Amino acid sequence: MKSESSFRIRLLSFFIFCFALFLVVRLYDLQIVSAEVYANKADRQYLQSTYHYYDRGSIFFQTKDGEPVSAGTLKTGLIVAVNPQVISNPEQVFQSLSSVLELDREDFFVKATKPNDPYEEIARRVPLDKAEVIDALKIPGVGVYRERWRFYPGNNMAAQTIGFVAYDEENELAGRYGLERYYDGVLNRNNDSVYVNFFAEIFSNISQTLSGDLDREGDVITFIEPSVQGFLEQSLFKMHESWDSEFTGGIIMDPMTGAIVAMGLVPSFDPNDFKNEDVSIFSHDLVEKVYEMGSIIKPLTVAAGIDAGAITPQSTYYDAGFMTLNNKTFSNFDGKARGLVSMQEVLSQSLNTGVAHIVQQMGKKNFAEYMFNFGLGQETGIDLPNETHGLVENLKSPRDIEYATASFGQGIALTPIQTVRALAVLGNGGKLINPHIADRITYKTLGSKKITPGIDVQVLKKETSEEISRMLVKVVDEALLGGTVKMDRFSIAAKTGTAQIPNPRAGGYYDDRFLHSFFGYFPAFNPRFIVFLYSVNPRGARYASETLTHPFMDITKFLINYYQIPPDR
């Protein structure tokens, strides 16, 4: 009996505890989690009770100190609506409202005189001060109601990366581009039923967190640093204007982790006002479009040759200025021969014949395997929609010429994000990392979740990474613009690229259209950042060293000062 009584007491205590916990959790849900939703419902009591009061999670930039800065949020205003069934004198109502609002007379009378219609909106996003004046007029048949809409405080800042919200095929508001689309399952809100069984939600959320599900409601915190993003975009705009380019773009990434702190494109757009834009401007060319990158691929070829033991930085070959393979002849950028030169000079003077020689030394199949290991031709898995893979079929060809041209970045086409991912391997100790924009998701319940994009893969020996970095530092110190941009206290590893643009109609390449590219990382032997820049068809300059060197150095100096990076030499 005593044991039975004790059991009943414990059982009763358990039920009391559960009930108390339920009350606490329910109170938390009402006052904290769903407080805004209930407040919004109270604010929206009017003619159409089924009207959806728009709600959506937020996207944030993140400062270098870890503070969130709004990138995509909601803005609140008011709707002025009329009930034609109540309005007896439309002219009088129009005159009263016109004293406060700018109204189109014809549009107003079409709406205000509709028979059997209880609700017509005549003005949206009305400022609070004007709405208060209208409300005070107490006009029969006129109501003022709250509304919310998507708002981007940075205007065109990181526009292609953030994306925007618009109506989809089912006439529902949804993320259409960028992070808005990729994380739509997180950002989307469904307020049809505000209250759900809280315990069920908790257990459901635990399960989803463990499985990495992205369909829980929350906010997205990115690595995009607003000051860095702003500086990058300012630099891109200056480059674009100076050289009258078709497109100009850039990426700034932590090469050790893949965290992207800035990425931008010019031309851009304002996601707050995009209705009159050509849809092509919305696509994110850094992940959706491929280019033949040219000579910035050469360091990958040299690194592969070193790692395979086919060459050393001191190895030499005889440069005749041209090479013929499979009855096809290619030459150095200037067609000139250098005679006996070292592998260092292959990078410093950007010799096409030199990297083709490396492919011959290591074997084309071995070379192709290294290129695939660098991720060429693969999607990176970056958290943006519509990522495309590179075009690298030439690395499967039986002909030697295809491998030779691939060694200096022609005949294969890559997205900029694939390119910067591969180039990061050179400086980060030989690891193929996973680029990502979002740092974490902050959920409505149960805290936040860190984004884990994938496992890094070792594709080069650490010693190879150090060796190629030394070679690229020498390129900057001695060869880039004659060594005039060298920084005495900072080691910078960098390389330019100039590639002819393919002619899709006539075949081959244009003689007068080029893609300029540039990458660099610093400090070279423990890099904090890798910077990638490119410009499509700049006018008035033949080589990327002319168009992109100084913008790269400006960005580098900004990052060094802004992050207070200590000197390494």
Image: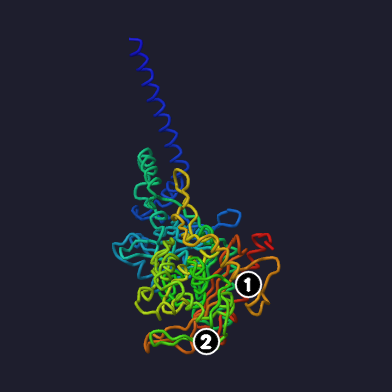
- In this view, the mark in front (1 or 2): 2
Q: Amino acid at mark 2?
A: Gly
Q: Quadrant of the C terminus?
A: bottom right
x and y, in percent, of residue 131 in the image: 49, 60
Residue named by callout 1: 474
Q: CA distance from mark 1 to mark 2?
A: 23 Å
Q: Quadrant of the N terminus?
A: top left
Q: Is residue 454 above or below residue 31?
A: below
Q: How is this picture coloured? A: rainbow
Q: Is residue 21 above or below residue 97?
A: above
Q: Amino acid at mark 1?
A: Lys
The residue nearer to you, when weighing 489 against 33, is 489
The numbered dot on residue 500 is none
Residue named by callout 2: 321
The residue nearer to you, when weighing 517 against 108, is 517
x and y, in percent, of residue 154 in the image: 54, 65
Classify mark 2: helix, strand or loop: loop
Indicate the quadrant where residue 396 lies.
Answer: bottom left
Can the viewer see residue 261? Answer: no
The mark that comes first in sequence, 1 or 2, is: 2
Q: Give the class, few, some or many, for how many residues have Cα within 10 Å of label 1's Cα (few <14, many ≥20).
A: many
Can the viewer see residue 470? Answer: yes
The residue nearer to you, when weighing 40 against 450, is 450
The residue nearer to you, when weighing 114 against 389, is 389
